[in-house]
Amino acid sequence: MASGMCGSILVTGSNRGIGLELVRQMAESPSPPSQIFAGCRNPDGPNAKDLKELAQRHQKLITIVCLDTSSESSVREAAKQVGSRLNNGALNLLINNAGINVPGTLSESGQKEMVDVFVTNTVGPMLVSKEFLPYLKKAAAQLGSQEMSCRKSAVINISTLLSSIEKCHTNFAFAPMYPYRVSKAAVNMLTRCLAEDLKSDGILVTAIHPGWVQTDMGGSQAPLPAEDSVKGMLKVFANLTEKDAGNLLDWEGNPIPW
C-alpha cells in the first residue's frame, strides 16, 4: 500500500493499467493522500468505466480530470481545474504515467509513428510538468524545511528499461520498438533536465521503470501483475530522497544505467 504518501497527487493516464492501479492502491491505503486527481483523456468514454466506478467508491478523495497529454490546450485547462480544487493551491506529487506504444520495428516506423509516440510520451510529460509547476512550487515552499521527497514536492516520470542505451544490446531483439524506445530515452533526459532546473525550488524529479507489467500495453505474457508493480513503486516513491534526483530506478528501487 501507499505507505508514506500524503498531500495532493495527480496521476496522468489513470483510466487503465498502471495508472488505474496507482489510483486504486493510493485510495485504498490505510493512510491515503488527502486528494487524488486522476487524469484521463476521455472520462466519458468506455475505457474510463473502471476509473469512474473507483471514483464513485471514493467520492471525497478521487477527482477525475479530463487530461489529454498530447494536447497543450487540454493540459492547460486541466491545470486550471486542478488548481481551483487543490488544498492551499499545493500539489505534492505529479506522476507522469500517460504513454502509448505502437508496433515499431524499423520497417513499421515512419514519421507519423515516431512523432505521435514522441508527442504523448515525451512532450506530454514536459507540458504537464510545466503547467502544474506553480502548484508543485507552492507545495515545496510550504514545506521548505523538509528534505526532498514525494511527501514534499516531486515529479515522477514513468520510463522503462527499454529506454536504457547501455542495455539496448541485451534486449533489442526481444523488443525492437523504435518509437517507444526513443521517446522514453528522451523522457530520461527530460527527467535530468527537470531535476537540475527544479532542485533550487526543492522539487524532486525521478524516473521509474515499472517492470514488464500485465496491462493492455505490456500484454498477457508479461510476468509482473500490475498490483505487484504498483505496490513496489509506491514503496520506492515513499523512500526517494535528493540522492535519487535525476536518476532512473526500477520498481524495486534498483538503479538502471542510461
Image (cartoon, rainbow, N blue to C red):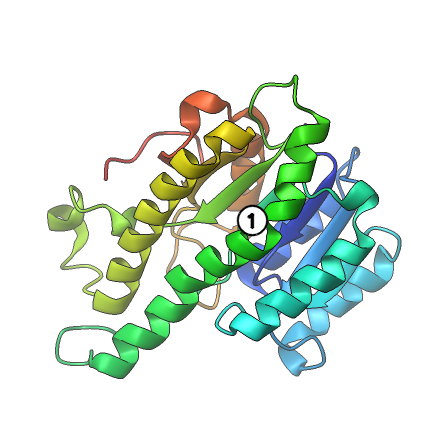
Under circle 1, the secondary element is strand
Q: Residue at x 59, y 65 (%)?
A: 16
Q: Residue at x 56, y 49 (%)?
A: 95
Residue 127 location (% of width, % of height):
49, 60
**Is residue 196 placed above or below 222 in the rendered structure?**
above
Residue 146 location (% of width, % of height):
64, 18
Q: Residue at x 67, y 52 (%)?
A: 23
- Residue denoted by label 1: 95
Could you tell whether 1 is left or right of 108 in the image?
A: right
Could you tell whether 183 is left or right of 208 in the image?
A: left
Residue 30 location (% of width, % of height):
79, 34
The answer to whether one can see residue 218 in this image is no
**Is residue 225 placed above or below 194 in the rendered structure?**
below
Quadrant placement of the N terminus = top right
Residue 126, located in which quarter of the rendered image? bottom left
Foreground of the two, 53 or 43: 43
Q: Amino acid at mark 1?
A: Ile
The answer to whether one can see residue 206 in this image is yes
Residue 150 location (% of width, % of height):
60, 32
